[in-house]
Image (tube, coloured by chain):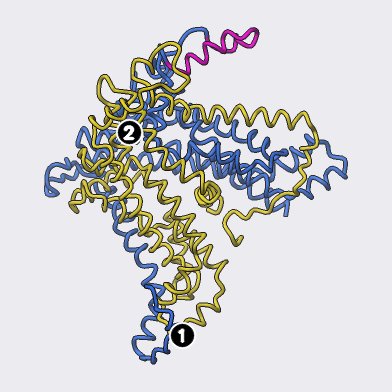
Chain colours: A blue, B yellow
Amino acid sequence: MTAPPAKLTPTPPIPKVGGWDNFQRKYAPYIFISPFFLLFFVFGLFPIIFNAYLSVHEWQPGSGLGDMKFVGLRNFTDNLTDPTFWLSLKNTAILAVESGLPQHLIAIPLAFAINMGLKRAQSFITAIYFLPYITSVVAISVIFFTLFSWQYGVLNAALNSLHHIPILGVLFPADKINWLGERSFVQPSIAMVIVWRYVGWNMLLYLSGLQAIPGELYEAAAVDGATRSEQFRFITLPLLRPTIFLAVTLSLIGGFQLFEEPFILTNGGGGVGQAGLTTIMYMFRTYNAYSDAGLAAAMAWLLFIVIGALTLVNNFAFGRSGTGSNEAAK
Amino acid sequence: MTSTPLAAPRATPRSISGKRPLSRAGSILLLFLGGVLTLAPFYFMFIFATHPRQEIFSLPPPTWFGHDLTNNYDSLLSRMPFWRNLWNSLYLAVLTTATTLFFCTLGGYAFAMYEFKGKSWLFGLLLATLLIPSTLNIVPFALIMQALGWIDTPRALWIPGMANAFGIFLMRQYIGSAIPRELVEAARIDGATEFTTFRKVIVPLTGPAMATLGLVTFVQSWNGFLGPLIIFRSAETYTAPLALRTLQGIANTDWGALMCGVALTVVPLLILFAFASRRLIDGLTSGALKG
């Protein structure tokens, strides 16, 4: 590695050995990209095909591969007639909305607030808001688990002291909330943690979306006599639309794959009345605890179909109009 | 394609709306409140790490540091091989980062600097793999690792991801925009083999992009949960998050000890973040913004 200083002269030109030189020159790029494709075939594509194969078989992972029994679509019908599967799907959908929507409703105003004239402190502010995103879900869930404590939790203590503020106090509950211990609060509690974790990330997406809008557009509009709200409606909103579309799509896809937060916050069990049981959690349980690989594989496909359908709907609803107005503005 | 990641054209420096003092004050208030709510859980993590269980769960909850940090620490070590688990996390994260950097830079170099048959098709395929949700992978992943005998070994986690589409894409963007092709041509004329060119010309010039990709990879590996949950089965091989999770599961959890462990796993990342937040944020969001 450390070359002696005397040898600063360029290395003597290697005589061109026609064959090898041509060979390595021609195939170098293929060799350089081959690790990705090899690994993708082994750990990306093959598992998907294997998952498809599994989904039409009955098999317990403990027994040998020879014990696989073809069962047709039975795994799919079993899932579709399993009330717990539907419950998990419903939970996932509720959690995706309860955690997805507030993320954006909070992140957009925050991005506006930074954009409004705190640009100098921008990197400091975004760094703080970004902290939850780089913290492990285990750490976050353990911390929130204590904050959510019913009798002695910080959250209830804080709400209680807010309740005693005159006038504004009525907005806050007088009684302690059993966050993770009461069925109706399990989902909002999990959603709260997810919102807390992803607001900063979304805020950053919106901020870069906002900053990509050229200032001249506003100036031109102001010259033409557009009011601030008109500027917002006719410049900011249409130009921010692709960003909104992207951010919503990402949290939708992410929301339907929720696993870590609900898993840890409910101690792996799904919580009271299984309200925190998401589909991925149920799939993991079907595979891990019930040892039914085929059923779990079929469940993965069903969830995949749901995610795919939602992405398409989202694309259809926002995607085209988003790119359309983007082009119109150019 | 824009050249450097995240180089979004900035709006004019003087903000139009910023002229109104009222909205500016409102912005500051909003951001301040949000910032407090964002930081509060971290604050309580440190506070609770210094209190025994019965103090954490008392009324009112503690809001300032206690005296039981060392007790909590001792209790943590008596319950799990914590430093061993932290070492496992570090080992996995470093190995993942090193291999990812090597293979993604190599792949990015090929896509940025070479013309070859099938290039655009292969690159399209690479990008398309980013869209596949991991849902379909979880069960087969566990089974494949079982079949390979890789359960309880870190390679089950670092090998599959070491040449990943996101990393190759990131490196391609950087190499394509920051390194002139003439440099590569010059190295060739000097008789360097393609790999020597990569090693001597490309690698030294990709520092910033490597730092970004390295940080992102390290953080994701360090925080990983589902992968390690599937792979690691014993207290000795657990990564730190996994080990802390098992502590939470038992009855009469020692929350002080648990918080102490949680804080010890979070602090390294906080330090890393303090020095490299800009780069880390850019890297973590660039996938979304460019994709």
Q: Residue at x 41, y 37 (%)?
A: B266
Give the labeled residue for mark 2: A281
Question: In the image, what residue type sits under mark 1?
Answer: Pro
Mark 2 burial class by Cα count in 10 Å: few <14, some 14-19, many 20+: many
Asked if residue A171 lies in the magenta stretch, the reply is: yes
Q: Residue at x 46, y 55 (%)?
A: B213
Does residue A178 lie above or below A118 as drawn? above
Residue B168, numbered label: none
Element at label 2 = helix
- Between A307 and A101, the one lying in front of the other is A101
Q: Residue at x 21, y 46 (%)?
A: B152
Residue A10, numbered label: 1
Name the mark nearer the viewer: 1 or 2. Answer: 1
Q: Position of residue B124 (x, y in %)?
A: 47, 62
Q: Which quarter of the figure is the C terminus of chain A placed in?
A: bottom right
Q: Residue at x 55, y 33 (%)?
A: A103
Return the disc, 1 or 2, that comes first in the chain's sequence.
Answer: 1
- Chain where mark 1 sits: A
Element at label 1 = loop
Quadrant housing residue B230? top left
Q: Give, as a single range, the part of the protein colored magenta.
A: A153-173
Residue A87 makes an appearance in the image? no
Q: Position of residue A257 (x, y in %)?
A: 40, 38
Q: How far apart, in angstroms, are the residues tagged by discs 1 and 2?
A: 60 Å
Q: Position of residue B114 (x, y in %)?
A: 48, 74
- Between B83 and A95, the one lying in front of the other is B83
Question: In the image, what residue type sits under mark 2?
Answer: Met
